[in-house]
Amino acid sequence: MPDPAPVGSAAALAALNARLEARGLTPVAPGPVDDEPRPDEPGHPEYHRQQRAAVALARWSTATPPRYQHATATDPAVIAWADAVATQPETARSLLITGTTGTGKTHQAYGVLKRIAAAGPHRYELIATTSADLYGELRPTGSAGAAEHRLRRLCEVPLLLLDDLGSAKASEWTEEITYRLINHRYNHCLPTIFTSNLPTRPSVDAQGKVTGPSLTSALGDRIVSRLAEMTTVVPMAGTDRRRTA
Ligand SMILES: Nc1ncnc2c1ncn2[C@@H]1O[C@H](COP(=O)(O)OP(=O)(O)OP(=O)(O)O)[C@@H](O)[C@H]1O
Ligand SMILES: [Mg+2]
């Protein structure tokens, strides 16, 4: 008996077709076999990206208050920052969105977190809080161990939104907590979104006299020095959207 033709060869296909025809069956058309997964099938990178995005968006929705569930990042600098974090969180800077009351800082902040989630990053864990809530939950009234544990979690979470930086009443204790949190995230290059109503630099009059509060007067120079190095500042202009809505 002659050796069978190698599997997949033209001779093997011809032999198979001859046997199919002899039984009245349709021959197999020659051509490449497409066994690559399609984008909607497991094994394709796009399928797995979409699965990660669905999980991340569910986490985003859980962490986001109802008012900002429909937030979308629209500022070009904010969008560029989101795309940098989604692709390379290790080298991305932090973001500081500044502006007066109601200009849309918190809206942009939740919108940017949603955009990162929708990109389907390999890791998506976030905590969103305001600086007043941060001090409220860390205040040493209960167990010191629980407060330290919470502070460590805030220091280490891959993505943190700290809304309204500099707006809570300052004390030595709030300055120390803020310093520990920001210094840790600065040292470990962890992407953080800050928003603040305060300008980064104090406003001064013609004589150089400071005329209003700034992040430096609220937080101290050591914290603001770190913010200057670690953040991209995005100023939001415009009027109070709450009053013009
Ligand atoms: N781009 C936008 N599109 C639609 N609504 C927006 C947009 N930006 C902000 N808003 C809405 O305007 C209102 C004020 O926005 P937001 O809370 O983000 O302001 P803010 O700058 O954080 O204010 P504050 O300084 O008081 O914290 C909210 O109701 C918000 O949902
Ligand atoms: Mg706000």
Image (cartoon, rainbow, N blue to C red):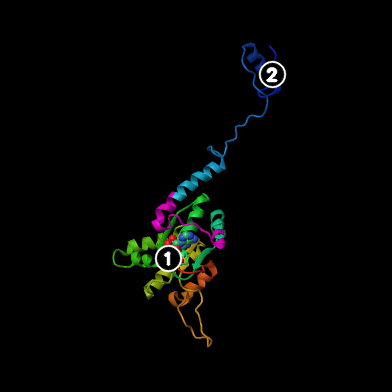
Q: Amino acid at mark 1?
A: Arg
Residue matched to label 2: 14
Question: Mark 1 CB in 8 Å range of ligand 1?
Answer: yes
Question: Which residue: 67% across, 27% down?
Answer: 31
Q: Earlier in the sequence, mark 1 or mark 2?
A: 2
Where is residue 40 drawn, in percent x and y? 54, 38
Checking the image for residue 1, the label placed there is: none
Question: Which residue: 40% across, 67% down?
Answer: 131
Q: Amino acid at mark 2?
A: Ala
Where is residue 21 drawn, in percent x and y? 65, 14
The front one of 176 and 230 is 230
Where is residue 202 drawn, in percent x and y? 49, 79
Q: Residue 66 appears in which quarter of the rendering?
A: bottom left
Q: Residue 241 appears in which quarter of the rendering?
A: bottom left
Q: Residue 32 appears in which quarter of the rendering?
A: top right
Cα–Cα gap, marks 1 and 2: 75 Å
- The quarter of the picture where the C terminus appears is bottom left
The single residue placed furthest to the front in the displayed view is 244
Q: Is residue 7 above or below residue 110?
A: above
The single residue placed furthest to the bottom in the displayed view is 207
The reply to whether the magenta stretch includes residue 235 is no
For the magenta stretch, what is the residue range? 58-79
Q: Is residue 117 above or below residue 132?
A: above
- The quarter of the picture where the N terminus appears is top right
Count of marks overlaid on the render? 2
Checking the image for residue 242, the label placed there is: 1
Kind of element beneath mark 1: helix
Question: Which residue: 61% across, 15% down?
Answer: 25
The reply to whether the magenta stretch includes residue 78 is yes
Q: Is residue 39 above or below residue 153?
A: above
Mark 1: few/some/many CA within 10 Å (<14, 14-19, 20+) = few
